[in-house]
Amino acid sequence: MTHGALGAFLEATVRTATPLLLAATGELIVERSGIIFVGLEGSILAGALAAAAGAYAIGVVGGTVLAAVAGSLVALLFGFFVVRLRAEQIVTGTAITLLAGGATGALYQTIFGTQGAALRVPTVGVIVLPLLSAIPAIGPALFAQTGFTYGAIVLITVVWWWMARTHAGLALRACGERPGAARAAGVRTDRVRIVAAATAGACGGLAGAALVLAQSGTFAEGMSAGRGFIAIAIVALGRWRAAGVVVASLAFGAASALQYLFQAMGWSLPYQLFLALPYLATLIALATARAGGAAPGALGRMAED
Amino acid sequence: MSNTRAPVRPSAAATLARPLRAIAATGLLLAFAIALLAALLALGGYDVSLALGALWRGSVGSSYAVTSATLVRATPLLLAGLAVAIAFRAGVWNIGAEGQLLVGATAAVAIASLPFPGAVRIALALIAACAAGALWAAPAAILRRRGVLEVISTIMLNFVALNLVGFIVRGPLQEPTHAYPQSSALPLEARLPRVPGTRLHLGVAIAALAALTLWVLMTRTAWGFRVRAVGANARAAAMAGMIDVQRTTLSAFLVSGALAGLAGGIEATGVTFALYEGLSPGYGYTAIAVALLARLDPLLVIPSAFLFGALEAGATAMQRDAAVPAALVSVVEGSLVLLVLAAPRLRTALDGALTRRVEAA
C-alpha cells in the first residue's frame, strides 16, 4: 500500500467522520437525558438548508450560525411534543424527520427554483496547522481539515468534561438514569430535557452545515442521507460515552472512506459489504453488552415517568 | 402511546360509536390536510387552484388515476402500515419496516427468477418475501430480550439491508451485461397479474385481505387479545399469569416483519419487476405515519394508506403540472401525524379550559 493512498484514506475518514461526530455529539447529550431523538435527521436537513441559504446571503459564518439555530428549532418542536405533550418519542421523531425532509426540499425548490444549475455557495477552506500537518500520513489527515473538524473535536471534549465534571452535567445524566430521583433532588427534568433536545438539534444543524460548507458546496433534497440515524448508531456503538462516540464516528467514517481506498488500489470488491460493517458491529456490540448494557436507564421510556 | 390504544374490551356503545367517530375524525384530518396544503401553496407563491386541481386529477380525479396511481402507491403503504400497526400495538417499536421490505423484495426477485411452473412461482416468491421479512426482524426481536432497544437495532438492520441490496444488485443478482446495478427484469410469468388497461395489480387485493385477516386476528382471537394486553400493559399482562409476554411480543414482531417483507415482494413482482437500490422511496418510514393516522387499527389502515397513496400520487402530478415540489406533501404527512399525536392532549386541554370557564362563571 502506498503512503499516498493511505494518506488519502485517512484524510477521507476524518472528513466523512466530521458531520457524523457533530450529530452524534448532539444525540449523546439528548440520550443521556433519557430521550431518543430520531428527528435528528430533520435537524441536519434544516441545518444544511439554513447553511446554504445563509452562506449564499451572508457568508459562511452567518450560514453556520443559522444552521445551528434552524437545527435547534426543529428539535424544540420535537421537545414540545415529547416533553410537554408527553407524545411518544420514536413516533414524534419520525414525524419530525418526515416534516423537516419535506419542508427543506419544498423550501429549497421554492426559493432557488427547480430548474437549472444547482445552487453554489461559498465553502470553508482547509486550515493547515503548521508542523503537525507535516507528520507523514496522519499529519494531513488530522491537521489539514476544515474548521468544522477542529470544532467537532473541541465540542466533544467540552461535552465530555461538562457531563463528567459539572453539576449541570450530573443533573443531565440523572434525568437519563433515574428521572424520579432527579426530580426528588430538585432537578427540573422537563426543562433539562428541552434544553438537551435544543442543544442536540443545534449540533445536528452544525452537522448539516459541515455537509454543505465543508463538503458539497450546495444543498440537495434529502442530502443528510440517513446520517441522523447513523448518529444514533454511533452513540450506541460508543456505549453512550464521549470517547466511544469519537471512536465510533471514525469507524463509520473509515467504512465510507474505504471506497476511495478501493478505487485508488484498483480493487473491485463490492464495498457495500464494508459499508454494512459498522452497523453489524453496532448490533454485535449491543448484543454482547450485559443486559441493558450501557444505555441510560430511562432511555426512551419517558411515558412511564 | 396509551392514549391511541382502544380499550382491551370495548363496551357495546363504544363499538357502535367508534366507526362514526372515526369517520368524523378522518373527515377533520382530511380537511386539515387540504387546508394546510392550500396555505403552504399560497405561502410559496404557487397557483393554489392549479396545484390542487393537479393533485385531484393525479390521485382520485379519474378511475385511471385511482387504479393506476393511488392504489398502486397505497398497496406497499397498506402492507407496511399493517406491519407497523401490529408491532406498535404489541408495544414493539419496529421502525425497521424499510429494511424488512427491502429483503422481502430481494427474496421475491431471487425466487421469481427461478423457473417454477405457473402460479407456483409467484406464490413461492411471495412466501419467500414474508419469510425474509420475518427473518430480518428476528435479530431485533431476539436482541430485545437482552434489553437492546429495538428502535436502534431495527435502524441498524435497515442500513444493513440497504447495503445488502446494493451488493446483491452488483453481484449475485446483477443483470447479465453487468452495466447497471440492478437485476434482470422478471419475465411475464413471474409478475403479478394486472387489471387490463391499468397498472393495478393483484397485490392490492392481497393487501386488503391481509388487513381483514389481521383485524380478525386482533379482535377475534386469543392471540390478538394477548398482543393487545401486552401492548397496553406488559407488566399487568405478565401478572395476570396467563400470558407469556416474551412469546407474544416475539410473535408480533415476526408477523410485523413478514408483512413488511410481503410489501417488498409485492412491489417487486407487481410494480418494479426488478431489484434495485431505489426500489422503495421510504415506504417503510411513511408506513409509520400511515399506521398512526389509523390509530394502529388494521381496518383503519386501509383508508389511511389510501389517503397517503392519493397524496403521493397527487404530489407527482402536482410537480409535473404545476411545478410544485412533491416534497411539500411530506410536510402535510408529518403534520398529520403530529396532529394525531397532539389530539388527546389538545382535547384534554380544551376540556380543562371549558371546565375552568364553567367554574369561573
Image (cartoon, grey):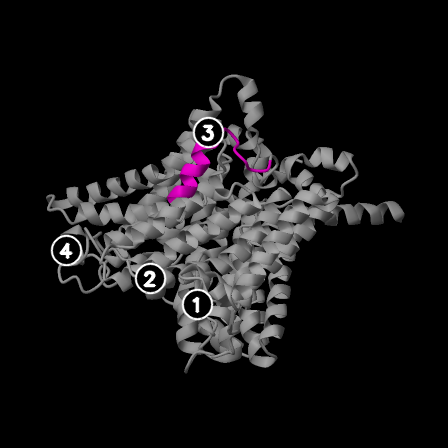
Kind of residue indicated by mark 4: Pro
Q: What element carries label 1?
A: helix
**Residue that badge 4 annotates:** B187
Residue A3 is marked as 2
Residue B232 is marked as none
Q: What element carries label 3?
A: helix
Asked whether the residues under marks 2 and 1 belong to the same chain, the reply is no
Magenta-highlighted residues: A280-296
Residue A91 % position (x, y) = 54, 47
Asked whether the residues under marks 1 and 4 belong to the same chain, the reply is yes
Horizontally, is A90 left or right of B270 in the view? right
**Residue that badge 3 annotates:** B145
Q: Is mark 2 on a helix, strand or loop?
A: helix
Q: Indicate whether A57 appears above or below B175.
A: below
- In this rendering, which labeled residue sits more in front, label 2 or label 1? 2
Q: Indicate whether B83 appears above or below B90.
A: below
Asked whether the residues under marks 4 and 2 belong to the same chain, the reply is no
Asked whether the residues under marks 4 and 3 belong to the same chain, the reply is yes
